[in-house]
Amino acid sequence: MDFETVRNLIASQLKADPATITPESRLVEDLKADSANIMVMIMDLEDQFGITVEDDQIMKLKTVGDVVNYIAKAKG
């Protein structure tokens, strides 16, 4: 899974500097994402990677690294 692709998509969605985003960056606490941001981000990731993120998994995605790992598993 390409961390840079996920990082750039999240940076664009949250209007953040990609250079400040690491795999350990927390979506809510560090990047100030709210529930609307997260839903749009999930939809963008689903479109970009051709996956479906199950509703019960969304709340488990706490960091950028969690998102990268989830996508890697989903693409299996």
Image: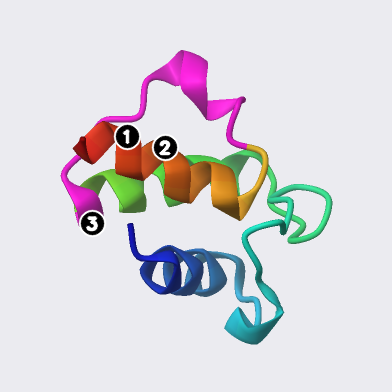
Tell me which amino acid carries mark 2: Tyr
Q: Earlier in the sequence, mark 3 or mark 1?
A: 3
Q: Is residue 51 left or right of residue 69?
A: left
| The disc label shown at residue 4, or none | none
Residue found at the very far right of the displayed protein: 29
Tag nearer the camera, 3 or 1: 1
Q: Is residue 41 left or right of residue 1?
A: right
Q: Label 2 near label 1: C-beta < 8 Å?
A: yes
Q: Which residue is mark 3?
A: 48
Q: Is residue 5 left or right of residue 50?
A: right
Considering the image in quadrants, where does the N terminus appear?
A: bottom left
Question: Residue 76 lies in what quarter of the image?
Answer: top left
Real-space CA distance between mark 3 and mark 1, rounded to the nearest whole angstrom = 15 Å
Real-space CA distance between mark 1 and mark 2, rounded to the nearest whole angstrom = 5 Å
- Image coordinates of residue 11 in percent, x first then y, are 55, 72
Residue found at the very far top of the displayed protein: 56
Q: Which residue is mark 1?
A: 73
- Image coordinates of residue 40 in percent, x first then y, are 44, 48
Tell me which amino acid carries mark 3: Gln
Identity of the residue drawn at 27% across and 33% down: 74
